[in-house]
Amino acid sequence: MRPCGPVLTTTPDFFADELPLAGSCAPLGVAAVVLRGFALARVDVLWPLLQAVVAQAPFRHMVTPGGLKMSVPLTSCGPLGWTSSRAGYRYQGADPASGRPWPAMPAAFAALARDAAAEAGFTGFAPDACLINRYLPGSRLALHQDRNERDFSQPIVSVSLGVPAVFLWGGLQRGARARRVPLFHGDVAVWGGADRLRYHGIAPLRESVHPLTGSERINLTFRKAGPA
Ligand SMILES: O=C(O)CCC(=O)C(=O)O
Ligand SMILES: [Fe+2]
């Protein structure tokens, strides 16, 4: 992993501080890092590809196994898509809303995930799932582990677009105190190895405006979900 500077623990004024951070890197753990602005130079390519994915598989609110409507609507691309329902959390090859396969993962998405993983020390990352979350002001994601994947030797690569958010970075136990780490447009968080099962979440999104996404934050989470 490349050398990392100190973690930014306060939220600076949005956007004014975004560009100076680009290219720096903030350690989250022994095998976890935020690569500041890693995706920025690729956004012009990623954004229209994302619109095409969402046109085929629109965002939808899923229901938790406990019967609650999730506050963050989501969709997926790639061979496998993460789903939640009364029956539990699982990866599926078809979009339950349409019965059709999820849209293909654009090559530029997979390349970004591979390159960010390599930058963080995980070479050869080949995601088979890209979960896409859409946050509106007030949307949040409760602390959770990403643990529906088969192979925990593979990292998680998480790309932030649009309005900044506060990433809650916890421990290996649910009760551990979570650090608050701001994530900006273009930042890529990567966690694996000893940090692969760290609890994490997103604090309620603040009201803000970004030139690309308006009041929204979009997150792309790349995983290797299926068998090797
Ligand atoms: O939106 C984020 O940055 C995190 C998303 C996440 O943890 C998930 O979808 O499992
Ligand atoms: Fe997660």
Image (cartoon, rainbow, N blue to C red):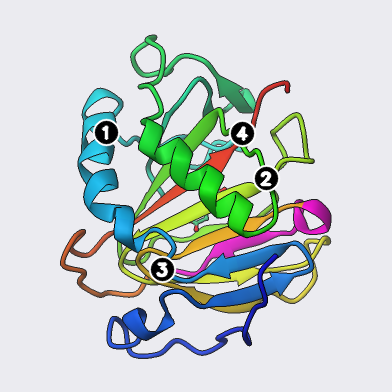
Specify the quadrant that holds the N terminus.
Answer: bottom right
| Badge 2: residue crowd in 10 Å (few <14, some 14–19, many ≥20) | some
Which residue is depicted at the point 80% across and 52% down? 193
Q: In this rendering, would 199 be left or right of 42?
A: right
- Identified at 50% across, 20% down, the residue is 79
The amino acid on which the numbered mark 3 sits, given as a three-letter code, is Gly
At x 51%, y 15%, the residue is: 93
* Residue underneath mark 2: 123
Report if the CB atoms under discs 4 and 3 are less than 8 Å apart.
Answer: no
Q: Magenta segment, which residues?
A: 193-204
Q: CA distance from mark 2 to mark 4?
A: 35 Å
Q: Are marks 2 and 4 in contact (CB under 8 Å)?
A: no
Mark 4 sits on what residue?
65
Residue 54, label in figure:
1
CA–CA distance in space, label 2 to label 1: 29 Å
Pointer 3 residue: 37
Whole-percent x and y of residue 33? 63, 67
Q: Which element is circle 4 on? A: loop
Ligand 2 near label 2 (Cβ, under 8 Å)?
A: no
Q: What amino acid is at disc 2?
A: Thr
Tag 1, which secondary structure?
A: helix
Q: Separation of disc 1 and disc 4 at Cα? A: 24 Å
